[in-house]
Amino acid sequence: MNAFYVTLISFNAFCFLAILLSGIRKEQPHFIGLACINILLLSFNLLSLLLLNTTDLQRAILLSKYHLSCLIIGIPLYYYVFGKWSKFRFTRQATIASAIICLPLLAYNLLSSFSLRYGEAPVLVEYVTLFGNLANVLTGQSNAYSAILHVVSSVMGLFLIYCSIKLYRQQLTFVSLSLLLTMLLQVSFGYTGYILDSQQSTFVYFGGLPMTVMSIFTVLNIAYGYSRQSSKLIIEKKHRDELHELFEQLARLSNESGNEDFFIDSTRLLAGYCSADFALLGIIDKADATQITTKVAVKYQETISNFTYARSGTPCEDVLKTGACMYPENVDVLFPDDQMLSDENIKSYVGYPLTNENNQPIGLLVLLFKRTLPKSNNLGIVTDVFATRLSAELRKIQLEEELKATAYIDYLTKLPSRAKLLHVINNVYSKQRVNDTNSLLLLFDIDHFGEINSKFGYDVGDQVLKIIGKRLNSYTSHSVFIARNGGDEFAVLLSDIKESVDAVVKTHWTAIKAIVSSTYLIGSRKISVTCSMGAVLLPHKLDEHFDIIGSAELALTVSKKDGRGHYRFFDPQLMSKLSQNRNIELALIEALNKNKELSVHYQPKVNIDGKLVGAEALVRWTSKELGFVSPADFIPIAEETGIIYQLGDWVLRRVLYDMLSWREKGLVLAPVSINVTASQFDDESFAEVLLDAINSFDIDASLIEIELTESGLLIEKERAIAQLSILRGHGFTVSLDDFGTGYSSLSYLSALPLDVLKIDKSFVDGLDDVKDRELVKTIIAISKSMELSVIAEGTETKHQVETLYNMGCELFQGYYFSKPLPAAELCSWLPKT
């Protein structure tokens, strides 16, 4: 007997924990209530064991009160648990009603001197149980309260039967049958309790067993649910792993395949994963939107020839109009006009649209099956992902085509761009080298176009280029290709020349001059321009490949040097100049990278007594391969190629290093001027770089003079003024070199923040000429009136120095006083501290 009750109590404790945890995790209140019932069952079974083992009547009466209280407390719980479980509409009301009935019974049972179950004169009787143990059973007279308890229990039983039926209707068959079995056991064991109280049986109190069985069944059901959930999770994980692998393969195809291969490989991959009999990637026909042309067609995992079909009467029409469509069965019946569905015995269909950047359909991705499709979310998800990825690839290709088209059209003139020009030249060059025919490239630009921008503004300059583009566009033909090469430079490509080359060039040059030289009416302005041109023959008689545009540009440059307004043919001898410039460029880059071969010399600036007042830093280059290279040769190349920025930075830091070295030797530093080219000065970060450099060497800004040419300042007046103002604000001095050789006016000069004017050497050399001498006097007078220092450069004779001094010039620079000196030799000119 003891083992029986201990087993029941253990089951109750186990069921309490299992059902409570499941109820909390799943947020199911009826499970939490059932767990509480198991606490009552545990208490009931424990009290049953104590009651049957006690020999003391008073203790037996007390235990009997507690024993009956467990049953009374359990009644409202039963209503709540199984009402909630079966989704009984009035669970709350039934629970409250039963609690109202049971609460007085519970109170009376606990507060009275006797147990309601056995009346006022109970007797403790010893008997032998069915387990062979001696036990004591409490017996007594029935009373009205016992009848009430039986009525309440009977009503509860009917309620539980009703709940069992509701559970069955909700397809919770296992729970319904468990509850029904519990009720049958409850009735059966209720009778055993009655005959035990009447001393007609050897049974023990089995009242807690039915609900314990119900709890065990519930735990088993929970375990089964967990097992089923676990199996489901395993299957889902397998599907996730398969999807992950599928999408990884799709990603690899995106990275590894070319455009066309990607579409084929992706469609085959999708068809293989979905076991589709057919997979189609179709695009709406641009010529006829009622037709769809397949880009990829796959049958039984193999690609087949593409084909075109009508949208009308097919499920594809629904996809393109309404979006994704899935017909898991009888699609051939639903769309009897779709010939392919009937011919191939297709039973199910999946289609997803392919869209452009505006989310408008441009095609579709279709899967066809000869079988009925099972219910599955994965098929739709996978097809959607592939359709999205394929749409993105189609959009990318379309964008690339649009960008390519945009790159081939010049935005301003609407003529073909340089990119298109290069493409056409390459095609013509390759074709004509094979066919042994000739073509001509004519490259022309507008003479002094920079002056139009400076004088009238860039908007006017752009309008001139637009008009030229419009005029040239009407000049194009099958054999005349015209493009904008950049800036104010235009190219004319003449293919398949069969006449005299000279005659062809003269004819087109005459036409081009007429087109370009016609007056331009822009607003109220009338603008006239001229042009210069370079020409090159393709293929050239040289066997080796050459830079065609570069050769034409070189011929154009020569025509400008010869006086502008005419054309010049490319001379093969000019190629050596081109090659020489390239060699200088490469050697200069190497010299800068290795910090070898380059040096800085300093030409003293002095007063009439020859006393040092400053020096100009001049870069010198003696190449191991090229020998001494004149700055006049490598500085322009450095500017054209952009190396000037690196070279300028090297010179600046070399000068600062030398000044630091002089200071460490105890010498008094003199201001050093550094030449800055137009392209350097046009860099917005120039001032910032210069300031960072002098700060890192701890050199005072007043010891550095920025020397610019007049033509350099004319490039961008506003930017020049802004940059110079910043530098002068930090203490730098600014000098204007070659004054008088450019195009600046006095009003322009007065707007610039300057400190020094330099008289160009060409005026110094021409002092014996009356006009030059008067011009020098004017320059000196201007500098005096503007409170600027004036220095004459290139002074080589005593006569020049004295003449200039008598005119009012007090500072000089030139070979009469000293040639440019290495840093070590300039030390002798610097006084000691």
Image (cartoon, rainbow, N blue to C red):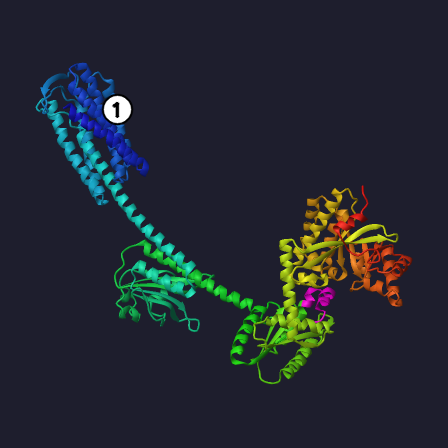
- Against 442, residue 650 (above or below) is above
644 left or right of 731 in image:
left
The quadrant of the picture occupied by the C terminus is top right
Which percent across, then down, holds residue 510?
A: 68, 81
State the residue at coordinates (78%, 46%).
Answer: 669
Corner quadrant of residue 618: bottom right
- Against 730, residue 55 (above or below) is above
Q: Does the magenta stretch include residue 450?
A: yes
Magenta segment main secondary structure: helix
Which percent across, then down, holds residue 330?
A: 26, 63
Which percent across, then down, holds residue 621?
A: 70, 58
Magenta residues?
443-461
- Against 270, residue 574 (above or below) is below
Which percent across, then down, holds residue 678?
A: 71, 59
State the residue in front, 125 or 283.
283
**Circle 1 SS class:** helix
**Residue labelled with disc 1:** 104
285 left or right of 173 in image:
right
Corner quadrant of residue 511: bottom right
Q: Which residue lies furthest to the bottom in this view?
A: 499
State the residue in front, 453 or 673.
673
Q: Which amino acid does label 1 sit on?
A: Pro
Specify few, some or many for label 1: CA neighbours under 10 Å numbering under 14, 14-19, or 20 or more: few
